[in-house]
Amino acid sequence: MGRIYNFSAGPAVLPEEVLKEAQEEMLDYRGCGMSVMEMSHRSKAFEQIITEAEQDIRDLLHISEEYEVLFLQGGASTQFAMIPMNLMKNKKAEYIITGQWAKKAFKEACIYGDARAIASSEDKTFSYIPDCSNLPIREDADYVYICENNTIYGTKFKTLPNTNGKPLVADVSSCFLSEPMEVEKYGLIYGGAQKNIGPAGVVIVIIRKDLISEEPLTGTPTMLRYKIHADAKSLYNTPPAYGIYICGKVFKWLKNIGGLEIIQKKNEEKAKLLYEFLDQSRLFKGTVRKEDRSLMNVPFVTGDKELDAKFVKEAKEAGLENLKGHRTVGGMRASIYNAMPKEGVEKLVEFMENFEKVNR
Ligand code: PMP
């Protein structure tokens, strides 16, 4: 088989078991005589797929009945607008800027109200998470927004900000289901599926029911109202049905391996391999403050652009693909999501060791 180790930041590696199962069910889904791609989203078979998917993610994250789980479209970027449109009752929101995705969300919110950036790590190229223990949050702020794992820069909030009781809204696109979460600490959690969960085209929103507004901002399109989707159980219109089906399989894969405590352990082991190597390397250097390091996205550099390019090229030839850093940062980035096997990271470290010997 010609599968490589895929370190892409997203769309990203999916569990092989899931892909094989989908392959087996491709032509005839469980006796339906058709694939999930071809069936009505109102059919019994699909109803079961989406109901089970919702229940499985609820089980994995221990999501209570106080929260709705929505399977939506438009990618994570549509949430940049949907959140202010639905949550900005006082038209005031506080944003913590820890990277390009938080910044984009902030800029989008500025279209709809008085969004303020109350903390930022831009002064050091987003290589750390700012202190969020005592933020200047307005009394009438509607929410506080974070990007919990910064895909491009490889930082992660290890402690959630003190929001002074305001709802916390978090983009978890690149750390979704990589470890347990205390859902009740958030007002809204969302993430695009295409990193840890499934194919691009699905975005999952977990929203506390009291935040689902009857009356979003004037002019909010029907499709961008959480209430519409919550009332219709994510079937207001044709959902990204095949994507939801794959997400459901990934949820079952996670349950089968023992849930989020187990996947967290595996992710910690994988990340440790790479970070320990980086910390002793005399050629490669991690770019993130140690205490803020992400378990999912690991950026590193040699300090020499040409050598970086050589590394990426030779790694690809060795079956280790998509290691080029984001275009705004340069260097390298290894995304080691849930479905990246430990052997993939071991192979990468071995390759880096050999590269270092030859190129130092
Ligand atoms: N948030 C984060 C943290 C991301 O990593 C990304 C995409 N890489 C996005 C938002 C944007 O996602 P989408 O392309 O689904 O709009």
Image (cartoon, grey):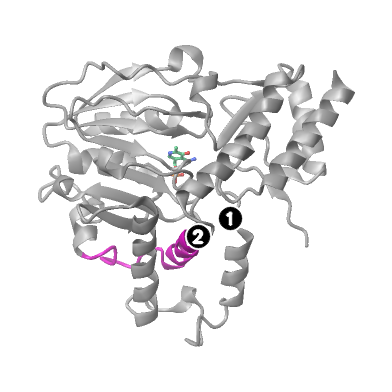
**Looking at the image, is mark 2 or mark 1 earlier in the sequence?**
1
Amino acid carrying mark 2 in the image: Val
Q: Taking 65 as reference, is 95 above or below it?
A: above
Magenta part of the protein: which range? 232-253
Q: Residue 1 location in percent, x, y?
A: 78, 62
Q: Residue 42 location in percent, x, y?
A: 32, 77
Mark 2 packing: few (<14 Cα in 10 Å), some, or many (20+)? many
> Disc count in the image?
2
Which of the 4 image quadrants contains residue 159?
top left
Residue at the right extreme? 358
Q: Taking 326 as reference, is 69 above or below it?
A: below
Amino acid carrying mark 1 in the image: Leu
Task: Name the residue carrying label 2.
Answer: 250
Callouts 2 and 1 close, C-beta under 8 Å: yes
Q: CA distance from mark 2 to mark 1?
A: 8 Å
Question: Which type of secondary structure does the marked residue at label 1 adopt?
Answer: loop
Question: Which type of secondary structure does the marked residue at label 2 adopt?
Answer: helix
Quarter containing the C terminus: top right
Q: Residue 53 location in percent, x, y?
A: 39, 64
Q: Taking 325 as reference, is 3 above or below it?
A: below
Magenta stretch contains residue 250: yes
Task: Name the residue carrying label 1.
Answer: 14
Which residue is found at the position 31% from the left and 33% from the top?
Answer: 108
Does residue 321 appear in the picture of this structure? yes
